[in-house]
Image (tube, rainbow, N blue to C red):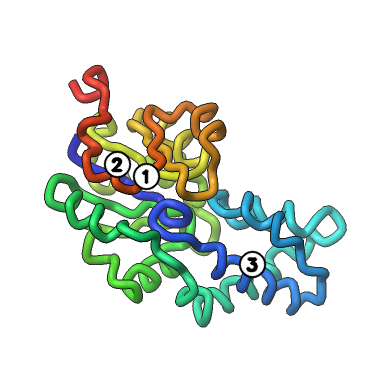
């Protein structure tokens, strides 16, 4: 294995505080009743449009683009500073960058992901940061992973996708990429297992010896 692709939200950092702040701001601007906090957690990971359609409900779905606009306005001014990177993620990335090429592959638009990682001094660990376009292009992990493989001329069989939701796992499988699900984020063990994750990690420290978990049939 030569390359690791990292999801951002729920894998490198906990976005809940930022996400909640941005969602509540957007709903307030549209004068729509805020969703319950318990309904927000499942929305972390999927493309924003998919999550927001569920939060808005049928009666307000025509206001989707307005909601996204206000969400993103708040995100770039305030939300970006409210992320909380997981403890020991720096130590893991420091060790891994000496052995592998590292890329961020997030459904979040790259114009938000790049300044976020720069603000928290995390961009130094990665060869490049990939995300979707604000238009929604490549928001699906399957499309984004395929794009990264092509852009970087990566061999899918020498690449690992690491993420906390089923979208990461399914996107990897559809591109012939080995997948590792992580349970410190927002996807459960059963979600990741049912999606077909090749390995599931419960501790960030397991990333430090990732080569020990790759099965021989994938490695060769």
Callout 3 secondary element:
helix
Find residue 173 and report its horizontal and vertical position in percent.
42, 29
Find residue 54 and report its horizontal and vertical position in percent.
73, 52
Of callouts 1 and 3, the N-terminal one = 3
Q: Residues within 10 Å of mark 3 (few under 14, many from 20)?
A: some
- Taking depth in this image into account, of 53 and 18 the one nearest to the observer is 18
Q: Compared with residue 213, is residue 94 higher up or lower down, i.e. above or below?
A: below
Q: Residues within 10 Å of mark 2 (few under 14, many from 20)?
A: some
Q: CA distance from mark 2 to mark 3?
A: 36 Å
**Residue tagged 1:** 203
**Residue tagged 2:** 206
Q: In the rendered image, is residue 143 in sight?
A: no
Marking on residue 68? 3
Of callouts 2 and 3, the N-terminal one = 3
Find residue 178 and report its horizontal and vertical position in percent.
33, 31
Q: Nearer the viewer, mark 2 or mark 3?
A: 2
Callout 1 secondary element:
loop
- Taking depth in this image into account, of 135 and 28 the one nearest to the observer is 28
Q: CA distance from mark 1 to mark 2?
A: 6 Å
Q: CA distance from mark 1 to mark 3?
A: 33 Å
The count of marks equals 3
Q: Residue at x 47, y 26 (%)?
A: 196
Q: Residue at x 37, y 36 (%)?
A: 180
Marks 1 and 2 in Cβ contact (< 8 Å): yes
Callout 2 secondary element:
helix
1 vs 85, left or right, is left
């Amino acid at each position: 294995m030569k390359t690791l692709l990292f999801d951002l939200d729920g894998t490198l950092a906990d976005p809940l505080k930022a996400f909640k702040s941005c969602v509540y701001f957007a709903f307030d601007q549209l004068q729509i009743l805020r969703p319950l906090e318990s309904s927000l957690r499942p929305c972390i990971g999927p493309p924003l449009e998919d999550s927001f359609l569920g939060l808005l409900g049928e009666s307000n779905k025509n206001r989707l683009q307005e909601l996204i606009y206000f969400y993103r306005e708040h995100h770039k001014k305030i939300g970006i500073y409210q992320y909380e990177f997981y403890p020991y993620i720096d130590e893991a990335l420091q060790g891994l960058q000496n052995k592998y090429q590292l890329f961020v592959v997030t459904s979040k638009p790259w114009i938000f992901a790049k300044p976020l990682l720069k603000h928290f001094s995390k961009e130094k660990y990665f060869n490049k940061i990939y995300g979707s376009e604000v238009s929604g292009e490549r928001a699906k992990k399957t499309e984004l992973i395929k794009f990264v493989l092509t852009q970087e001329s990566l061999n899918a069989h020498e690449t690992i996708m690491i993420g906390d939701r089923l979208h990461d796992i399914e996107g990897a499988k559809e591109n012939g990429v080995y997948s590792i699900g992580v349970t410190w984020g927002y996807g459960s063990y059963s979600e990741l297992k049912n999606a077909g994750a090749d390995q599931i990690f419960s501790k960030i420290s397991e990333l430090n010896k990732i080569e020990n978990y790759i099965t021989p049939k994938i490695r060769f």
